Amino acid sequence: MKFNRLSDLIAQDQLQGKRVFIRADLNVPQNNNGSISEDTRIRASIPAIRQALDAGAAVMVTSHLGRPTEGDFQPADTLAPIAVRMSELLDQPVELRQNWLDGVEVAPGQVVLLENCRVNKGEKKNDDALAQKMAALCDVYVNDAFGTSHRAEATTHGIAKFAPIACAGPLLAAELDALGKALNQPSRPLVAIVAGSKVSSKLTILKALSYKVDNLIVGGGIANTFLLAAGFKIGKSLAEVDLIGEAKAIIEIMAQRGASVPIPVDVVCSKEFSAAATAVVKDVKDVEDDDMILDIGPKTAAILAEQIAQAGTVVWNGPVGVFEFDQFGEGTKVLALAIANSKAFSIAGGGDTLAAIAKYQIADKIDYISTGGGAFLEFLEGRTLPAVEILEQRAG
């Protein structure tokens, strides 16, 4: 992928005295009183802002927050708490500006936060008139919000069409570099772990990866559907019977390439789904009609950990069991530690995956942790991300 980078513009001294408009992802969780409960995304946005300020730019930053109604600003929609936290992190004032479409007063070395961009009419529909208004505010547009890059909106796509210069900030560039390395120029073997409750929600990802990866490890409810496809009973476990044919097709595609979908040889079962449920390890052929499969077994975990140990690249999306309950978390823990100890280039993404990484304290041993959510999944599917596509066009 070829796109302009903020770092390149700075190296060429193209930001001095310029108005820079940064689209960040500041959509942070908040408590009932509106205070920020977790500020990872704000901290992640700081490098782009600091780099632009240090290069002599006048900096404007905006983001969406929550799900506001366009044209109907409510107090809960405000970025005010984010402005306060951002000013603490930057160690300089960050003013919040309302009604900013008709002009923004900002001087070189100053940063202002523009109120919730999704309140503007036409934002989600990527309205050209709105995008042109925003583009007129700046000399350089910077997209540093990978998490919204799968959506074509006025602040992620439209403005990039009309701004004099459009580029990727350090967060977006790092994400694209890591994903590109993992999927387009991977060190082999390439192992993908795709887990979750439903095959249907990740069917397109599984199909896309079946043509690329050497081992496709499935977990959770997805693995149960593949167990059915392989002819095993799964008791009353979560599965999608209508997608057994799709699972068989994916197994066949992999087999024709000399690749594999490892089917569990043992599983961890229970008669109930609860934090107090008793966990019983069984060979996969011994699952009873009233059993629920809630994790992979220790033999399966060891086999998969060995595949991970031999991998050149690992892409991880989803825990392989109900890891929130410790008695059904051992499979996910074993694979997580295998990834952490592997020499492979590892990239992980998705909310449950990030929770598992935090639980097993391996964040510093994963090469790249994606905060993208939906964008991460769409990249894995091989889909074109609109906000990235327009940056590539502008670079050309």
Image: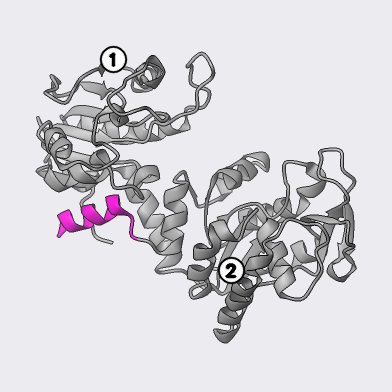
Residue under the image location 15 percent in, 29 percent down? 56
Which residue has dot 2 on it?
311
Q: Check disc 1 and report its element: helix, strand or loop.
A: loop
Give residue 369's position: percent from left, percent from top: 50, 47
Whether residue 12 is visible here, answered yes or no, is: no
Q: Nearer the viewer, residue 11 or 288?
A: 288
Which region of the structure is painted magenta?
Answer: 384-396
Name the magenta segment's main secondary structure: helix
Q: Is 66 left or right of 190, judged from the image as shown? A: left
Establish if 55 lies above or below 162.
above
Q: Which one is earlier in the sequence, the residue at label 2 or at label 1? A: 1
Separation (CA) of disc 2 from disc 1 = 47 Å
Q: Nearer the viewer, residue 95 or 386?
A: 386
Q: Amino acid at mark 2?
A: Ala
Which residue has dot 1 on it?
93
Residue under the image location 45 percent in, 49 percent down? 374
